[in-house]
Amino acid sequence: MTRRGLVIALALAGCAARSPAPGAWIATAAEASRAADEALASGQIDLARERLRRLVESPSSRLVAANDRRVILQDAYFRLAEVELGAHAPARAQAWAESGLALGVQRDLFTANLYIARGGARAALDDARGAAEDYRAALDINEALLADATEVP
């Protein structure tokens, strides 16, 4: 399993543990993520893009907690943005990252990843100022997360 696959698997496991009856949507999200990982590993970029796109466009269960839904979708939007950056389509990458950020900005890995992806898209689109702002926002989040993790009680 890839590092990214491990991150989403852990996030999905945490979501399922916190939601008493999350329904089939979390299982569908986990399957889409796994299928996208496999497609990317075998170089099938279009298939990976399709799997992730279907996930972000699918209706989510009302039983899924709002924050759980956000992190699952933000991870998928980040991965879509990364796919588009790899395919030299920075405008599409920026659009995916912005869709993910529109779900909410939190001080977590998922938001930081979206800022990094949008920063990469903006840099590729010759928007150095916007890229720097996004990279700074991601750095601020990562520094806060590191401070929280290393805080001695």
Image (tube, grey):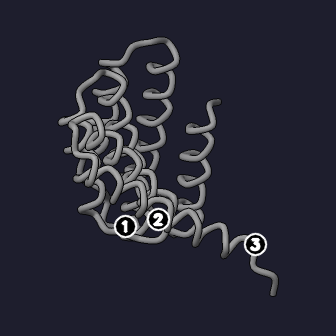
CB-based contact (under 8 Å), mark 2 and mark 1: yes
* In this view, 141 is above or below 72: below
For the question of whether residue 57 can be seen, the reply is no
* In this view, 91 is above or below 87: below
Helix, strand or loop status at disc 2: loop
What residue lies at 41% left-to-right and 44% top-to-bottom?
Answer: 29
Farthest residue to the right: give it. 152
User: Mark 2 Cα within 10 Å, few/some/many (few <14, many 20+)?
Assistant: some
**Spatial separation of the CA atoms under disc 3 and disc 2:** 34 Å
The residue tagged 1 is 63
User: Mark 3 Cα within 10 Å, few/some/many (few <14, many 20+)?
Assistant: few
Helix, strand or loop status at disc 1: loop
Image coords of residue 12 (percent x, y): 53, 52
**Spatial separation of the CA atoms under disc 2 and disc 1:** 6 Å
Most foreground residue, 146 or 65: 146
State which tag comes first along the sequence, 3 or 2.
2
Query: Is residue 7 rendered to the left or right of residue 127?
Result: right
What residue lies at 45% left-to-right and 36% top-to-bottom?
Answer: 33
User: Mark 1 Cα within 10 Å, few/some/many (few <14, many 20+)?
Assistant: some
Most foreground residue, 135 or 62: 135
Helix, strand or loop status at disc 3: helix
* In this view, 38 is above or below 13: above
Kind of residue indicated by mark 2: Ala
What residue lies at 42% left-to-right and 53% top-to-bottom?
Answer: 72
Count of marks placed on residues: 3
The residue tagged 3 is 150
Give me the disc on residue 21.
2
Image coords of residue 65 (percent x, y): 41, 70
State which tag comes first along the sequence, 1 or 3.
1
Kind of residue indicated by mark 3: Thr
